[in-house]
Structure formats: structure tokens, C-alpha cells
Image: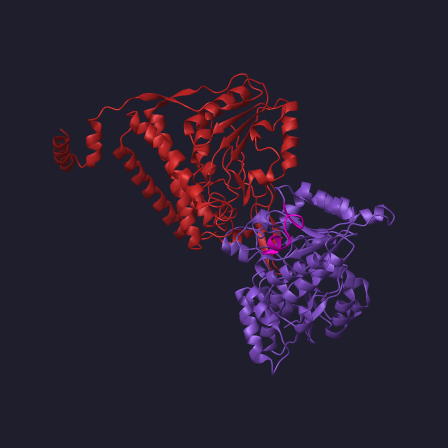
Chain colours: A red, B purple
Amino acid sequence: MRKMLAAVSRVLSGVSQKPASRVLVASRNFANDATFEIKKCDLHRLEEGPPVTTVLTREDGLKYYRTMQTVRRMELKADQLYKQKIIRGFCHLCDGQEACCVGLEAGINPTDHLITAYRAHGFTFTRGLSVREILAELTGRRGGCAKGKGGSMHMYAKNFYGGNGIVGAQGQIFEAYNMAALWKLPCIFICENNRYGMGTSVERAAASTDYYKRGDFIPGLRVDGMDILCVREATRFAAAYCRSGKGPILMELQTYRYHGHSMSDPGVSYRTREEIQEVRSKSDPIMLLKDRMVNSNLASVEELKEIDVEVRKEIEDAAQFATADPEPPLEELGYHIYCSDPPFEVRGANQWIKFKSIS
Amino acid sequence: MAAVAGLVRRPLEQVSGLLLRRRFHRTAPAALQVTVREAINQGMDEELERDEKVFLLGEEVAQYDGAYKVSRGLWKKYGDKRIIDTPISEMGFAGIAVGAAMAGLRPICEFMTFNFSMQAIDQVINSAAKTYYMSGGLQSVPIVFRGPNGASAGVAAQHSQCFAAWYGHCPGLKVVSPWSSEDAKGLIKSAIRDNNPVVVLENELMYGVPFELPAEAQSKDFLIPIGKAKIERQGTHITIVSHSRPVGHCLEAATVLSKEGIECEVINMRTIRPMDIETIEASVMKTNHLITVEGGWPQFGVGAEICARIMEGPAFNFLDAPAVRVTGADVPMPYAKILEDNSVPQVKDIIFAIKKTLNI
């Protein structure tokens, strides 16, 4: 039967110029959706948590797969460009953590507001910017989302407040917890717990590593951050909690980064290669979604492979653009210091060098 | 035998330096090629050994050997009690360090970059700098705050700020800014031995740069006095005052101009506060022309202070032209290479400023 179908498809593809796999696919029946069990979240000050089963539609599954694969490939391309010295400075990659940004976005609305730290490329994409704009920002070109002026850690979009370079501020987070709870602000505090703060394991840096409990009077969830469906359900739950006026909530996503802290960190002086390999082989978020979809007949292996090919091409094209696009013009060095102000002059390296500044 | 042991102990770059020394021994005094990173490492090592009250704390300083490897080997040698990894918590650990200093220890508090010191600046200024004064001379705070300052390469706006002017503004603080390996070693040792809070503004781009360390700088008691500038190059036509990495650019500019018959006197400030204005004044009274060169922003900067003080002192009447400042551009540091290159003082900007001042 399969051979006959293949033969038929070869003929048809010649006639209709459709790729063979597409024709093959059209003749299969996929399920529209499937129900999956997901890990129960650990709860802090909550009677009930997110559901332990969820329904994934074929359409959503394909969308999540494509998005996670895009983030993965984009980060790996950034690694390559960094090693070629086309990307400079700091570059903090999130490969391994794709389920976090994609799952989060799946649980909120585009009109919600999001802010994060420097490991931000994935969020920049899920918040709506294109791979082209992101890679061109990494390479410091005028087509970058911040016109080349921000770089890796300073990317912004509508309802996305970056991309921020300075972190740590443990005291500040408790100040934020206090005010959010006091004023019942609809705020989800999320900790992407990837087990290490730069080169220091959480055990060496935190008196309590139960981050989801550290909001104290703020309820919290601990979530399997490698399972995109778990992240999605937890986010839906947390968002609903906030929107109902109950105040802030905390989510700890247990996740893992394959790369070191940044491109200057090989990432193996404070953890073993075996550990990294184990996570990759047992908990890779893209692999987990793929296995689920294939095993429940939501998609075929070939179909997902085709998405891989398309994603690869998209990233290649974006990288081409990011490498070929010219740098921002020197005349614009002084632009965008102030907002809504009339133009003024900016001093350069000495009093005779002047740049124009417009808002 | 000791020399062989020394050879084995030291990293590769130093070994080759030692081997070279053997050959040059008969013609020149013994000097050693040492990078700024190694010099700071040596300085801290020697002071840790000399005084058990000295200790180092900061992010990644122990088991990671330092984010920029400046504290390499120290944790292995001195252990958990003297070399302490902190959580990412600047306000917290700076406060702990100040408290330790008040109680009689001699902490070296590392900020991974001085940009992060803004998270802790209340501790540096209000808890450390002002306390001896506020207590009427009762409570001293013998602490060193050190780390890389100023622009690096491609690290963008939040990681490129120069804090020389901000810290230099505050009475009660001492602020030093080494350029060479000799500077780095002598100043870190003096800073650790000083009973006052000292801010040591290092430079990430200088860490890997080797310098010849003269014989006297190799001694364990080698100190560079805080508050004294050094004339790196003698000249007669114009005085160039600078600190940190731009000192190298000034020397480059001086070399270029020397071919045109212009001899620049290049002063390496070494200390921002207390400023050695006397050395600058004496030079200006000789050359009659002055430019200042710094990486920080122009407004309220180090150069602005130098110009103001020159006007207040005897050297003003010796100026044949207004003093000129060469600085970073007055913008948050952009990421794109072409913009970044034009946001820091380049050799060509220094040469241009010199010629303008000399009316050439």
C-alpha cells in the first residue's frame, strides 16, 4: 500500500509540482486533537493548581513545534555567528529553555506585558519580532529591532520591555513582591530556574531553592519547564488567577540551558557534560512535543521534518540578511537620547565633533 | 632551584619572559613581561599572604577563578574563608563587606563590572565613604572596591559606563585608575593597605595587555602611592593628562606627532581622587598647553575638574590657549561597531585636539 502510494505521489508530484511528502500527507488521517497527561505542579498557598490533563489541537501542536524549533535554530545560528565574531559583546542563549518562552506566550495574550533579563532572544521572538530583526540586532545592523544600538541584551517590542542587562537585585524582588501583594497587582513573577546563576549552582547561592515558595505571602507554582504543555497550563492558571483580581502569583519553571551562561562561558567548569547530555536525551522540550504528537497521530515524522527544513531556511535567510545589512549610519549616533524633544546637538569625542540628536 | 620552581609555578607567558630575561641579563636590568591581569592577581596574592585579615568576595571570584580570571588560583591557595563566592546580590554583599571592614577585617569587594556597583552604590557612598567623617574619626572603613570600569567591546549601554567622575565626586573615598601592570600591582597593594575606602577602577580591555614590570615592581613591598601621578613621557609643547586605557592612546598620539616635531608630555593620573594637580600644574607651566583625555562622558567629568582646578591655580596664567577635553561621546554606549568606535576617544581625536590647541 505504501509503495503504491509512493508511486502515485511521484506521478502526481510531477504533474502538480507539489512536494511528494505533501501529497502523501494529504492521504493520511490525522487526529484533530489529543489529550495528554501533564505533571502536577507543586503548590504553595494554593488549594488547587492547574489541570493535570490538557487537550492539544493539531494546529496548536504544529505551531508550538515550529516556534520552538525556530527559537532553537535561531540560538544555534547566533552561536555560529558569535564564533565567527560577527556578533560581539555578550550573548546569552536560551536553547534548552524553549518550552518556557513558547509555553508562556501560549498562556497569555499579546496585550499582556512582559519583561525579562538578558536571556531574551526567545521571548523577543515569541513577543512578535522576526528572526531577521533579532539576528540583525545581534550583528549590530540598521535592520535590527533596536537599529543596531542595543545588541543582544536590549531588544524591545510592543508590550515587551526587554531584554535587560543588570540582574541579581535579590532585595529588589522582595520589594516588588511586597508592593504587588499589598496593592493586589495582576502580576505573574516567573523564575526560569535553570539550576545555575552564571557559574554558581543554586545550592551555593540560595538559602532556599524552593523559589516558588519564596514569595512567602504570594502563592506559587513549581512547573516542569521542559514540557510546553505544562508551562501553558500553568500560565493559563496563573493568568486567570491574576485577572480575577486576587493579586500576584509566582511561577517557578524548572528548566535547563544547554549553553554556558554566555558565549564567554564554556559551561562545563561547574557542571558535567554527562549532565548536559542527560537532559538533552531525556527532557529536550522539542523532542518531548514531537514524540507526543507523533505517538498520538497529531502529526507525522515527515511533516515535522519538513517544518525543520522550512525553519532552517528561514534562519539561513535571516542570517544572510543580518550579515549583509549595513551598519547604522554614523550620523545617527546621537539619535533617540530624548523622546518628544526638539532636535539638539550632541558632543562627540571632542568639542569639534558634533552629532545631531532627534527624538 | 627556587628559580626552577618559579618557572614551573608560573603561567606560560611569564615563563617565556623569564627565559628572555636570561638572555638580556648582561645588557639590561631584569624586567618581566606581566599582563595587567597577572599584576592584579599577584598584588592581591601578596597582600592575602601578608595579612590574614585581607579577604576577597564577589561573584564567581572563587571556584570560577573570577569572571575575567583576575582571581585565578587564589581560592585553591587560600580556601573558602578568604576567597568567597557570593550570590548575585551586590547591595547585599557590598553591605556585608562594609560591615566586615568596620569590624576590623580588610575586605576586597569585587564588582563584576562597576556598572553593577550601581546596585550597591548606597553602601559604597553612605556606608563606606562618609562614615569616618560622620563618626568624628571613630569608625574607619578599610575596604577596597575593585572591578572593571568603562567601555569594553560591544557590551552596549548598560555595561559600558565609566564611574571615575561619579566616585571621584565623593569626599571620603579614594579612587585610583591603573593603566599599566606596574600601576595595577602597586595601586592594588596600596589600596589594600590603605585604611580608607578605595575604589579601584580597572579596565577589562587592559587585562590581557602585557607590560614590562621593572625590577623594583617585582618586590613584595612595591607600592605606588595613592594621589601621585606619573609622567609617562616627557615633552615640551603640550601636556596631555589621562587615566586608564586612554593613556595608551595618548602615547600613540605622541609617537605620531613626534615625527612632526611636536613633543607631548603625557601624564598618567593613576589616581582620580585625591587628584595630583601639582604634577599637572608643573607640566602646564612648562608646556603652556593642556588637553585631557578620558573614556567617560564629558559633562561633569574628570577633564572638567582638571580644567576648573587649572583655572584656580598658578598654571592658568601660563596657558597660551584654552584647555581642551577629549572624552567619550555624550550618548549611552551604542552596540553597533561603527557607532561604538565613534563613541570612545580614538587616537585621531586626540591628535586633532592637540593640533587645534597648538593652533596647527
Vertical side of B230 occupied by B75: above or below: above
Residue A136 percent across, percent down from the top left? 43, 47
Quadrant of image for the N terminus of chain A: top left
The answer to whether residue A324 is seen in the rendering is yes
Which residue occupies 44% across, 29% down?
Answer: A103
Which residue occupies 74% across, 46% down?
Answer: B100
Q: Is A263 situated left or right of A246 in this image? A: left
Q: Nearer the viewer, residue B240 or A342?
A: B240
Vertical side of B30 occupied by B99: above or below: above
Residue B228 percent across, percent down from the top left? 75, 65
Total numbered labels placed on residues in the image: 0
- Residue that lies at the very extreme toward the front in this rendered image: B1
Residue B333 percent across, percent down from the top left? 57, 51
Highlighted magenta segment, given as a residue range: B72-85
- The stretch drawn in magenta includes residue A311: no
Quadrant of image for the C terminus of chain A: top right
Q: Residue B183: which quarter of the image? A: bottom right
Vertical side of A120 occupied by B258: above or below: below
